Amino acid sequence: MPINIPDHLPARSVLEKENIFVMGERCALRQDIRPLRILLLNLMPDKPATEAQICRCLSNTPLQIEISLLQVATHTSKTTSKEHLLSFYKVFDDVKDDRFDGMIVTGAPVEHMPFEEVDYWPELCNILDWSRSHVYSSFYICWGAQAALYRFYGIGKLPLPKKLFGVFEHAVHFPTMPLVRGFDDCFLAPHSRHTSLDEAAVRNEPRLAVVSSSPEAGAYIVASKDGRQIFVTGHSEYDAGTLGKEYRRDLDKGLPIEMPVNYFPNDDPDRPPPLLWRAHSNLLYCNWLNYYVYQETPYNLDEIK
């Protein structure tokens, strides 16, 4: 079934070339069903690339999905054009009176900074607090997951001795949980971060469960026990080449960076990396949309509490 995104969003042509069913706005209006309303708060620098990655992950369910793109108003993007942002993005004042079935909050390249020193931290806290009464289930990625755990549960992040960078194997700890239904016992997912969760604090929080973890990467999927908050510390949405682009970017900048682990064939950066986490990524987002959003959200969004 289709994902409904704005007609002229660049991600549309990317997805259509991959034979993903994308529905135009006019066509969607003719269908006599209510689509799931998903709000994407995009904090990544390359917003068009992230839009395509997230929309790809959301496109493999039998549900019609309506995406609204949100940016923070208190930060000026240096890498995404003003024209793109004005054409496709809203700010919080535009959506604060609306309600959504689900919300996704991306990562952001601000890990080295204390949360309170991020220029848009007060605005992000306002959005996170608002989501508790205006969004049924929220999905937080990487730094977005760290920020939400800190805001809602007071769980901090910990610096790593070096960047956690590569593709790592993870285990499922609650195989009967709907979020990981259909997962293999072990699966791969990419990580790219300089900090980690305080996993001991997560495990000591009775409202949370560590659903999946990795010996190298630590807690990967954390969920609130009511299912309304999903925290993912890695980047299952990444394209096959994303880690490679980050690696070459840091090399060009002269930054200390090691080759991503388990990524390039035979550790040869001239060989294209295989996409080994696609099935896991699709299943993670499909399970969230089906079991935690579609099956649970009131048909009348005004009834969200």
Image (cartoon, rainbow, N blue to C red):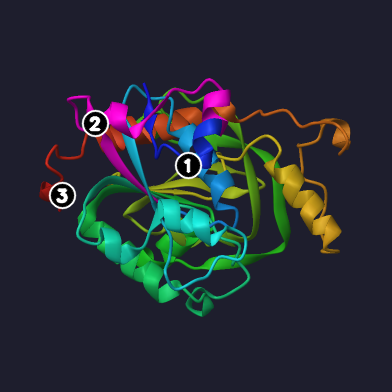
- Is 27 covered by the magenta stretch? yes
Look at the image and tell me in which quarter the N terminus lies: top left
Q: Which residues are magenta?
A: 14-41
Q: Position of residue 22 (x, y in %)?
A: 42, 27
Marks 3 & 2, CB-CB < 8 Å contact:
no
Mark 1 — residue? 9
Question: Quick check: 247 above or below 282?
Answer: below
Q: Is residue 234 visible?
A: no
Residue at 33 percent of width and 43 percent of height = 38
Q: Is residue 132 visible?
A: yes
Mark 3 — residue? 304
Mark 2 — residue? 29
Q: Which residue type does callout 1 highlight?
A: Leu
When asked about the image quadrant of residue 14, the answer is top right
Which comes before the other along the chain, label 1 or label 2? 1
Q: Which structural element holds mark 3?
A: loop
